[in-house]
Amino acid sequence: MTVKYLPAFILCLALMGCGKAEPPKQVVVVINDYEVSQEEFEQGFAQSPYAVREDRGKARGEYLDNLINQKLILQDAQKKNMDKDREFLKSIERFWEQSLLTIAVGTKTREISGSLQVPPDQIQKLYQQMVKEGLTTKSFEEMYPQIKWQAAKQFEAQALALWMDGLRREAKVKINDSLLKAAK
């Protein structure tokens, strides 16, 4: 590139960089170096028990005080390296695993129940079995919703078990029996 085109090139770069910039973040509070944006504050407040209180102004003030206290305690804990403690990290790992398990199983359950169809003849068979065993004296029509729900839950449990079996079949699992026996 020749020198005569350099000013035009710089001008083009400058103009391209002058696109719409994001509006500056509105900060509700700064706690030492930690900023709480208005969006973060509003989301936290809306999810808190303070949001249902009638005196919104007072509730917002109390939520803000509580938020400041929490952030100060967390900052103090971090200064003392409590966030690097082995037990703390293990507890975070356990929480993460439990949360992910809950989400994964819930997602699979919704997927299964969304595609689940309980055959009407299956509901009829279950009703007849209940009558035969003396578990109900109600009519089929009265029992239909309950039996359908129970059958759906049974099919759902079976489908989850099949899913789990499939995961186990596809996985490579090696168990060291000698270590397990030694722990007894």
Image (tube, grey):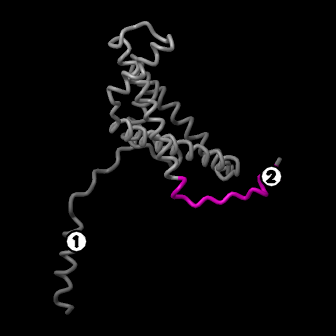
The residue sitting at 32% across, 26% down in the picture is: 120
Whether the residues at callouts 2 and 1 have beta carbons within 8 Å, the answer is no
Q: Position of residue 70 (x, y in %)?
A: 56, 37
In front of the other: 49 or 11: 49
State whether residue 91 is above or below residue 142.
Answer: below
User: Position of 38 compared to 100: left or right?
Assistant: left
Near-viewer residue (168 or 125): 125
Q: Amino acid at mark 2?
A: Lys
Q: Is residue 85 above or below residue 38?
A: below
Residue 88, image x and y in percent?
A: 66, 46
Q: Quadrant of the N terminus?
A: bottom left
* Label at residue 14: 1
Q: What range is drawn magenta here?
A: 168-183
* Residue projecting furthest to the top: 137
Which comes sooner in the sequence, label 2 or label 1?
1
Q: Indicate which label's residue lies in the foreground, 2 or 1.
A: 2
Badge 2 element: helix
Amino acid at the residue labelled 1: Ala
- Please report the residue visible at 81 percent of the width from the left and 50 percent of the height from the top: 183
Residue located beneath label 2 in the image = 181
* Image mark for residue 102: none
The image position of residue 136, as x and y in percent, is 46, 10
Question: Is residue 79 or residue 105 the one in the foreground?
Answer: 105
- Residue at left 38%, top 27%? 122
Quarter of the image for residue 77 reads top right
Q: Secondary structure at mark 1?
A: helix
Which residue sits at x=50%, y=42%?
161
Within 10 Å of the Cα at label 2, are there few (<14), some (14-19), or many (20+) other Cα atoms?
Answer: few
Q: Is residue 144 above or below residue 48?
A: above
CA–CA distance in space, label 2 to label 1: 70 Å
